[in-house]
Amino acid sequence: MSSPTRPAPTRPDTPRLVTGATAPPRRSSRLVLGITLVAGLVLGLAVARLLAGAGPATTPSVQRLDLPGVAAGAPAPAPPPPAEGDRVAVEEATSPETAVRGFLTAEALGDFAASYAFLGPDDLATYPTPGAWVAAHADLPPITGFAVERVTDATVVTLTGLRSTLDQVMGLIPARSRDTWKTVEVDGSFRVDHGASTTLPLYPSDAEVSATVARWAEARQECRSERQADGVLLGAPALAEQLCGASGEIVVAEAAPLQDGQDATVLLNAYGPEVYTWARVVDVREPVALQAVTAPIADEWQVIAVLPTP
Protein backbone atom coordinates (compact mmCIF):
# COMPACT_ATOMS: atom_id res chain seq x y z
CA MET A 1 0.00 0.00 0.00
CA SER A 2 1.28 3.48 -0.83
CA SER A 3 2.51 5.74 1.92
CA PRO A 4 1.21 9.29 1.22
CA THR A 5 3.40 10.94 3.82
CA ARG A 6 6.66 10.28 1.99
CA PRO A 7 7.72 12.86 -0.63
CA ALA A 8 8.00 11.96 -4.29
CA PRO A 9 11.69 11.97 -5.32
CA THR A 10 13.32 13.90 -8.08
CA ARG A 11 14.25 11.53 -10.87
CA PRO A 12 15.33 11.62 -14.52
CA ASP A 13 12.69 11.20 -17.21
CA THR A 14 14.12 8.00 -18.68
CA PRO A 15 15.27 4.99 -16.63
CA ARG A 16 18.63 3.55 -17.59
CA LEU A 17 18.96 0.01 -18.92
CA VAL A 18 22.20 -1.82 -18.26
CA THR A 19 23.01 -5.07 -20.01
CA GLY A 20 25.44 -7.79 -18.98
CA ALA A 21 26.85 -5.63 -16.21
CA THR A 22 28.03 -8.57 -14.14
CA ALA A 23 29.73 -10.49 -16.93
CA PRO A 24 33.56 -10.32 -17.01
CA PRO A 25 34.96 -8.55 -20.08
CA ARG A 26 35.89 -10.70 -23.06
CA ARG A 27 39.49 -11.00 -24.20
CA SER A 28 40.18 -8.51 -27.02
CA SER A 29 40.78 -10.11 -30.41
CA ARG A 30 42.87 -7.05 -31.43
CA LEU A 31 45.25 -7.66 -28.56
CA VAL A 32 45.72 -11.28 -29.58
CA LEU A 33 46.31 -10.16 -33.18
CA GLY A 34 48.95 -7.68 -32.01
CA ILE A 35 50.79 -10.38 -30.12
CA THR A 36 50.85 -12.66 -33.16
CA LEU A 37 52.21 -9.88 -35.39
CA VAL A 38 55.03 -9.12 -32.99
CA ALA A 39 56.00 -12.58 -31.89
CA GLY A 40 55.44 -14.38 -35.19
CA LEU A 41 53.18 -17.10 -36.44
CA VAL A 42 54.55 -19.84 -34.20
CA LEU A 43 54.12 -17.84 -31.02
CA GLY A 44 50.66 -16.75 -32.19
CA LEU A 45 49.56 -20.35 -32.61
CA ALA A 46 50.88 -21.19 -29.19
CA VAL A 47 49.00 -18.31 -27.64
CA ALA A 48 45.83 -19.37 -29.45
CA ARG A 49 46.17 -22.92 -28.12
CA LEU A 50 46.79 -21.55 -24.63
CA LEU A 51 43.70 -19.37 -24.83
CA ALA A 52 41.59 -22.24 -26.15
CA GLY A 53 42.60 -24.44 -23.26
CA ALA A 54 42.34 -21.82 -20.55
CA GLY A 55 38.77 -22.75 -19.59
CA PRO A 56 35.19 -22.27 -20.71
CA ALA A 57 34.31 -19.24 -22.77
CA THR A 58 32.92 -16.25 -20.97
CA THR A 59 29.11 -16.06 -21.24
CA PRO A 60 26.89 -13.03 -20.79
CA SER A 61 25.18 -12.60 -17.43
CA VAL A 62 21.78 -12.55 -19.15
CA GLN A 63 20.81 -14.83 -22.01
CA ARG A 64 17.71 -14.84 -24.20
CA LEU A 65 16.30 -18.35 -24.19
CA ASP A 66 13.91 -19.63 -26.84
CA LEU A 67 11.39 -21.36 -24.60
CA PRO A 68 8.32 -23.27 -25.77
CA GLY A 69 5.32 -21.00 -26.00
CA VAL A 70 7.31 -17.77 -26.18
CA ALA A 71 6.28 -15.63 -29.13
CA ALA A 72 9.11 -14.10 -31.17
CA GLY A 73 7.20 -10.82 -31.19
CA ALA A 74 3.85 -9.44 -30.22
CA PRO A 75 1.17 -11.99 -31.16
CA ALA A 76 -1.62 -11.12 -33.56
CA PRO A 77 -4.66 -9.41 -32.02
CA ALA A 78 -7.06 -11.75 -30.26
CA PRO A 79 -9.89 -12.91 -32.55
CA PRO A 80 -13.29 -11.31 -31.90
CA PRO A 81 -15.96 -13.35 -30.13
CA PRO A 82 -18.46 -15.22 -32.33
CA ALA A 83 -22.11 -14.25 -32.55
CA GLU A 84 -25.15 -16.44 -32.14
CA GLY A 85 -25.53 -16.50 -35.92
CA ASP A 86 -22.13 -18.16 -36.23
CA ARG A 87 -23.31 -21.39 -34.61
CA VAL A 88 -22.79 -24.64 -36.51
CA ALA A 89 -25.25 -27.49 -36.05
CA VAL A 90 -23.59 -30.80 -35.28
CA GLU A 91 -25.29 -32.26 -38.36
CA GLU A 92 -23.33 -29.72 -40.47
CA ALA A 93 -19.93 -30.99 -39.25
CA THR A 94 -19.11 -32.71 -42.54
CA SER A 95 -15.47 -31.55 -42.56
CA PRO A 96 -12.72 -31.10 -39.96
CA GLU A 97 -13.04 -27.31 -40.21
CA THR A 98 -16.81 -27.18 -39.69
CA ALA A 99 -16.47 -29.54 -36.69
CA VAL A 100 -13.85 -27.29 -35.08
CA ARG A 101 -15.83 -24.16 -35.90
CA GLY A 102 -18.93 -25.63 -34.33
CA PHE A 103 -17.06 -26.74 -31.22
CA LEU A 104 -15.19 -23.46 -30.66
CA THR A 105 -18.22 -21.27 -31.38
CA ALA A 106 -20.21 -23.13 -28.73
CA GLU A 107 -17.29 -22.88 -26.29
CA ALA A 108 -16.87 -19.13 -26.84
CA LEU A 109 -20.61 -18.61 -26.35
CA GLY A 110 -20.45 -20.54 -23.06
CA ASP A 111 -22.79 -23.25 -24.35
CA PHE A 112 -20.88 -26.28 -23.10
CA ALA A 113 -23.80 -28.61 -23.68
CA ALA A 114 -23.63 -27.68 -27.36
CA SER A 115 -19.85 -28.12 -27.55
CA TYR A 116 -20.26 -31.55 -25.94
CA ALA A 117 -22.08 -32.74 -29.07
CA PHE A 118 -18.91 -32.15 -31.12
CA LEU A 119 -16.66 -34.38 -28.97
CA GLY A 120 -15.16 -37.56 -30.41
CA PRO A 121 -15.49 -41.12 -29.05
CA ASP A 122 -12.39 -40.99 -26.81
CA ASP A 123 -13.59 -37.76 -25.19
CA LEU A 124 -17.05 -39.24 -24.64
CA ALA A 125 -15.41 -42.11 -22.79
CA THR A 126 -13.64 -39.56 -20.56
CA TYR A 127 -16.73 -37.38 -20.14
CA PRO A 128 -19.69 -39.78 -20.36
CA THR A 129 -22.31 -37.08 -19.69
CA PRO A 130 -22.75 -33.39 -20.61
CA GLY A 131 -22.57 -32.63 -16.88
CA ALA A 132 -19.11 -34.20 -16.66
CA TRP A 133 -17.96 -32.05 -19.58
CA VAL A 134 -19.37 -28.90 -17.99
CA ALA A 135 -17.62 -29.73 -14.71
CA ALA A 136 -14.31 -30.23 -16.56
CA HIS A 137 -14.35 -26.54 -17.53
CA ALA A 138 -13.21 -25.66 -14.02
CA ASP A 139 -9.76 -26.69 -15.29
CA LEU A 140 -10.00 -25.51 -18.91
CA PRO A 141 -9.00 -22.06 -20.18
CA PRO A 142 -12.09 -19.98 -21.06
CA ILE A 143 -12.25 -19.49 -24.84
CA THR A 144 -13.39 -16.06 -26.06
CA GLY A 145 -12.92 -16.32 -29.83
CA PHE A 146 -10.97 -18.01 -32.60
CA ALA A 147 -9.73 -17.68 -36.17
CA VAL A 148 -8.92 -20.68 -38.37
CA GLU A 149 -5.37 -20.36 -39.71
CA ARG A 150 -4.96 -23.56 -41.71
CA VAL A 151 -6.44 -26.99 -42.31
CA THR A 152 -4.30 -30.04 -43.06
CA ASP A 153 -6.10 -33.33 -43.58
CA ALA A 154 -7.95 -33.96 -40.30
CA THR A 155 -6.07 -31.25 -38.36
CA VAL A 156 -7.20 -27.65 -37.88
CA VAL A 157 -4.94 -24.91 -36.48
CA THR A 158 -6.53 -21.87 -34.86
CA LEU A 159 -5.47 -18.65 -33.22
CA THR A 160 -7.59 -18.83 -30.08
CA GLY A 161 -8.53 -15.95 -27.80
CA LEU A 162 -8.62 -16.72 -24.07
CA ARG A 163 -9.79 -14.91 -20.96
CA SER A 164 -6.37 -14.16 -19.46
CA THR A 165 -5.89 -14.55 -15.71
CA LEU A 166 -3.25 -15.47 -13.16
CA ASP A 167 -4.26 -17.21 -9.97
CA GLN A 168 -3.10 -20.02 -7.74
CA VAL A 169 -5.79 -22.42 -9.00
CA MET A 170 -5.55 -22.16 -12.80
CA GLY A 171 -2.06 -20.67 -12.90
CA LEU A 172 -1.41 -18.43 -15.90
CA ILE A 173 -3.89 -18.25 -18.77
CA PRO A 174 -2.47 -16.12 -21.60
CA ALA A 175 -4.58 -13.86 -23.79
CA ARG A 176 -4.25 -16.15 -26.79
CA SER A 177 -2.86 -19.45 -27.92
CA ARG A 178 -2.22 -21.35 -31.12
CA ASP A 179 -4.13 -24.62 -30.97
CA THR A 180 -3.83 -27.72 -33.12
CA TRP A 181 -7.18 -29.52 -33.12
CA LYS A 182 -7.36 -33.18 -34.09
CA THR A 183 -10.58 -34.47 -35.58
CA VAL A 184 -11.97 -37.94 -36.23
CA GLU A 185 -14.57 -39.13 -38.71
CA VAL A 186 -17.64 -40.76 -37.19
CA ASP A 187 -20.34 -42.16 -39.48
CA GLY A 188 -19.64 -39.69 -42.26
CA SER A 189 -19.30 -36.58 -40.09
CA PHE A 190 -16.43 -35.19 -38.03
CA ARG A 191 -15.88 -34.72 -34.32
CA VAL A 192 -13.17 -32.96 -32.29
CA ASP A 193 -10.65 -35.18 -30.53
CA HIS A 194 -10.14 -32.76 -27.66
CA GLY A 195 -7.85 -35.03 -25.66
CA ALA A 196 -5.42 -35.40 -28.59
CA SER A 197 -5.34 -31.70 -29.42
CA THR A 198 -2.45 -29.45 -28.35
CA THR A 199 -2.07 -25.81 -27.38
CA LEU A 200 0.86 -23.37 -27.61
CA PRO A 201 0.55 -20.28 -25.36
CA LEU A 202 1.45 -16.96 -26.98
CA TYR A 203 3.00 -14.25 -24.82
CA PRO A 204 3.94 -10.59 -25.34
CA SER A 205 7.48 -9.97 -26.53
CA ASP A 206 10.29 -10.24 -23.98
CA ALA A 207 11.57 -6.91 -25.30
CA GLU A 208 8.85 -5.16 -23.30
CA VAL A 209 9.72 -6.63 -19.91
CA SER A 210 12.55 -4.34 -18.78
CA ALA A 211 10.64 -1.19 -19.76
CA THR A 212 7.62 -2.44 -17.82
CA VAL A 213 9.71 -2.99 -14.70
CA ALA A 214 11.33 0.45 -15.09
CA ARG A 215 7.90 2.11 -15.20
CA TRP A 216 6.76 0.02 -12.26
CA ALA A 217 9.80 1.20 -10.28
CA GLU A 218 9.11 4.80 -11.27
CA ALA A 219 5.58 4.54 -9.93
CA ARG A 220 6.87 2.93 -6.75
CA GLN A 221 9.30 5.80 -6.28
CA GLU A 222 6.25 8.07 -6.29
CA CYS A 223 4.51 5.74 -3.83
CA ARG A 224 2.05 4.51 -6.47
CA SER A 225 1.30 1.04 -7.75
CA GLU A 226 0.91 0.44 -11.48
CA ARG A 227 1.99 -2.21 -13.97
CA GLN A 228 1.49 -4.59 -11.08
CA ALA A 229 -0.87 -7.56 -10.89
CA ASP A 230 -3.88 -7.32 -8.60
CA GLY A 231 -3.36 -8.73 -5.14
CA VAL A 232 -0.35 -8.95 -2.84
CA LEU A 233 3.15 -9.11 -4.29
CA LEU A 234 4.76 -12.46 -3.57
CA GLY A 235 8.29 -12.85 -2.23
CA ALA A 236 9.73 -9.85 -0.41
CA PRO A 237 7.26 -6.96 -0.92
CA ALA A 238 9.09 -4.89 1.71
CA LEU A 239 11.81 -4.31 -0.90
CA ALA A 240 9.24 -2.69 -3.17
CA GLU A 241 8.15 -0.44 -0.29
CA GLN A 242 11.74 0.80 -0.01
CA LEU A 243 11.37 2.38 -3.45
CA CYS A 244 8.70 4.74 -2.09
CA GLY A 245 10.41 8.11 -1.71
CA ALA A 246 13.82 6.76 -2.78
CA SER A 247 15.81 9.27 -4.81
CA GLY A 248 18.16 8.53 -7.64
CA GLU A 249 18.18 7.17 -11.16
CA ILE A 250 16.39 3.91 -11.90
CA VAL A 251 18.76 1.34 -13.38
CA VAL A 252 17.42 -2.00 -14.61
CA ALA A 253 19.01 -4.94 -16.40
CA GLU A 254 17.72 -7.03 -19.26
CA ALA A 255 15.01 -9.59 -18.63
CA ALA A 256 15.84 -13.26 -18.15
CA PRO A 257 13.81 -16.42 -17.46
CA LEU A 258 13.21 -17.39 -13.86
CA GLN A 259 15.86 -19.82 -12.61
CA ASP A 260 16.26 -22.08 -9.62
CA GLY A 261 18.18 -20.48 -6.79
CA GLN A 262 16.40 -17.12 -7.17
CA ASP A 263 14.20 -17.69 -4.11
CA ALA A 264 11.74 -19.09 -6.63
CA THR A 265 10.13 -21.55 -4.21
CA VAL A 266 7.30 -19.16 -3.36
CA LEU A 267 6.44 -18.81 -7.06
CA LEU A 268 6.76 -22.54 -7.67
CA ASN A 269 4.39 -23.24 -4.79
CA ALA A 270 1.90 -20.65 -6.03
CA TYR A 271 1.83 -21.39 -9.76
CA GLY A 272 3.47 -24.78 -10.29
CA PRO A 273 6.44 -25.70 -12.49
CA GLU A 274 4.94 -23.84 -15.49
CA VAL A 275 6.17 -20.64 -13.85
CA TYR A 276 9.63 -21.40 -15.27
CA THR A 277 8.16 -21.23 -18.79
CA TRP A 278 6.48 -17.82 -18.63
CA ALA A 279 7.98 -15.79 -15.75
CA ARG A 280 10.63 -13.19 -16.56
CA VAL A 281 12.98 -11.60 -14.02
CA VAL A 282 14.55 -8.14 -14.18
CA ASP A 283 17.31 -6.95 -11.85
CA VAL A 284 16.63 -3.46 -10.50
CA ARG A 285 20.12 -2.15 -9.68
CA GLU A 286 19.29 1.37 -8.49
CA PRO A 287 18.03 3.05 -6.33
CA VAL A 288 17.05 -0.16 -4.47
CA ALA A 289 18.55 -3.52 -5.35
CA LEU A 290 15.87 -6.15 -6.00
CA GLN A 291 14.58 -8.58 -8.59
CA ALA A 292 11.16 -7.95 -10.10
CA VAL A 293 9.33 -11.02 -11.39
CA THR A 294 6.81 -10.43 -14.17
CA ALA A 295 3.99 -12.44 -15.78
CA PRO A 296 2.35 -11.94 -19.21
CA ILE A 297 -1.22 -11.22 -18.12
CA ALA A 298 -3.59 -10.22 -20.93
CA ASP A 299 -1.51 -8.23 -23.42
CA GLU A 300 1.12 -6.82 -21.07
CA TRP A 301 3.77 -7.84 -18.59
CA GLN A 302 2.91 -7.15 -14.96
CA VAL A 303 5.01 -7.40 -11.81
CA ILE A 304 3.82 -10.28 -9.61
CA ALA A 305 6.69 -10.75 -7.13
CA VAL A 306 9.79 -9.12 -5.69
CA LEU A 307 12.83 -11.17 -4.73
CA PRO A 308 16.09 -10.21 -3.01
CA THR A 309 19.06 -9.78 -5.32
CA PRO A 310 21.34 -12.83 -4.98
Image (tube, helix red, strand yellow):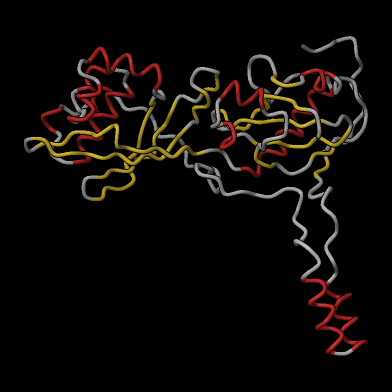
The quadrant of the picture occupied by the C terminus is top right
User: Which residue: 80% across, 83% down?
Assistant: 45
**Observer-nearest residue: 210 or 38?**
38
Which quarter of the rendered picture does the N terminus lie within?
top right
Where's residue 270, x and y in %? 59, 20
Q: Residue at x 72, y 39 (%)?
A: 210
- Report the front residue among 285 and 8: 285
Residue at the image position 16 percent from the left and 41 percent from the top: 95
Q: Position of residue 304 (x, y in %)?
A: 66, 24
- Using residue 182 as the reference point, say whether residue 303 is left or right of it: right
- Residue farthest to the left, as pictured: 187
Q: Is residue 271 left or right of residue 181?
A: right
Where does the image place residue 233, in percent across and percent down from the top left?
A: 70, 19
Quadrant of res 284: top right
Q: Is residue 86 above or below residue 71?
A: above
Query: In the image, residue 229 lies at what x, y percent?
Result: 64, 21
Left or right: 41 as drawn, with respect to 137: right
Count of labels in the image? 0
Depth check, front residue: 88 or 154: 154
Instruction: Give the quadrant of residue 184.
Output: top left
37 relative position to 202: left or right: right
Q: Is residue 49 above or below residue 195?
A: below
Location of residue 193 (image quadrant): top left
